[in-house]
Amino acid sequence: MLISYLVFITNKQATMSGHNKWSKIKNKKAITDAKKSKIFSKLVKLIQVESRLSHGNMESLGLRTAIQKAKEANMPSDNIDRAVKKGAKGEGVELEMAVYETYGPGGVAIMIEILTDNKNRSSAEIKHILSKNGHALATPGSCSWAFHKEGKEWLPQTTVEISAEDGAKLEALIDELEENDEVQEIFHNGL
């Protein structure tokens, strides 16, 4: 009698374990799908803007770069083609590029590139994220001296060594900024 009871309990736990495993897999998939969706939506915006600027010319450096980024993120070709066509036709919302500058933990200069349909709203959102982390927007040009622009990227001319603690704070700030759908790229000169 005792043996059959133990077998029953063991089988019940095995069943529950299998259910729990599926729940974990499902939750992990939902998280990765959400991250992929966020990346894809950012890339679609970028492709549409570059397509609009180049009038759909696939030989344009900006459009080629945006498409290359999309392919590196494993975005389906159909999505890329739709974004190029939509941008070339001038459909959708008029999006603008903007660059915000700030100094982060340990005095690291940070350049934040955004793509938005409303600069006032985006500016307020970026200011809010920075203020939550103890920082504020810098005046235009106050951080750009530490970088030179090569193509579409801001490359640091000077670098700043930061402590492990400041590095963790910088990483947390960048992660929070990247959660914003309008933030396209973040560049910094910290080591």
Image (cartoon, rainbow, N blue to C red):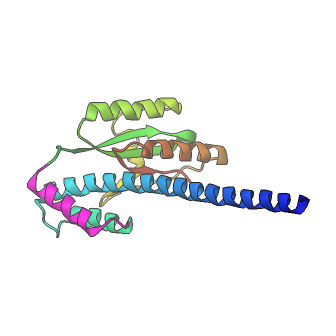
Q: Nearer the viewer, residue 91 or 163?
A: 91
Magenta: predominant secondary structure element?
A: helix
Give coordinates of residue 27: x percent, y percent. 53, 53
- Residue 2 placement, left or right of 179: right
Residue at the farthest right position: 2
- Residue 118 placement, left or right of 37: left
Is 35 part of what is drawn in magenta?
no
Residue 120 visible in this rendered orientation of the protein:
yes
Segment colored magenta: 74-91
Q: Residue at x 74, y 57 (%)?
A: 13
Give coordinates of residue 168: x percent, y percent. 61, 46
- Residue 148 placement, left or right of 64: right
Q: Which quarter of the picture shows residue 143?
A: top left
Residue 138 visible in this rendered orientation of the protein:
no
Q: Residue at x 90, y 58 (%)?
A: 2
Q: Nearer the viewer, residue 40 or 69?
A: 40
Give coordinates of residue 147: x percent, y percent. 40, 51
Q: Residue at x 20, y 55 (%)?
A: 48
Q: Which quarter of the picture shows residue 182?
A: top left
- Residue 177 placement, left or right of 27: left
Q: Which quarter of the picture shows residue 139?
A: top left
Q: Nearer the viewer, residue 112 or 2?
A: 2
Screen quadrant of the C terminus: bottom right
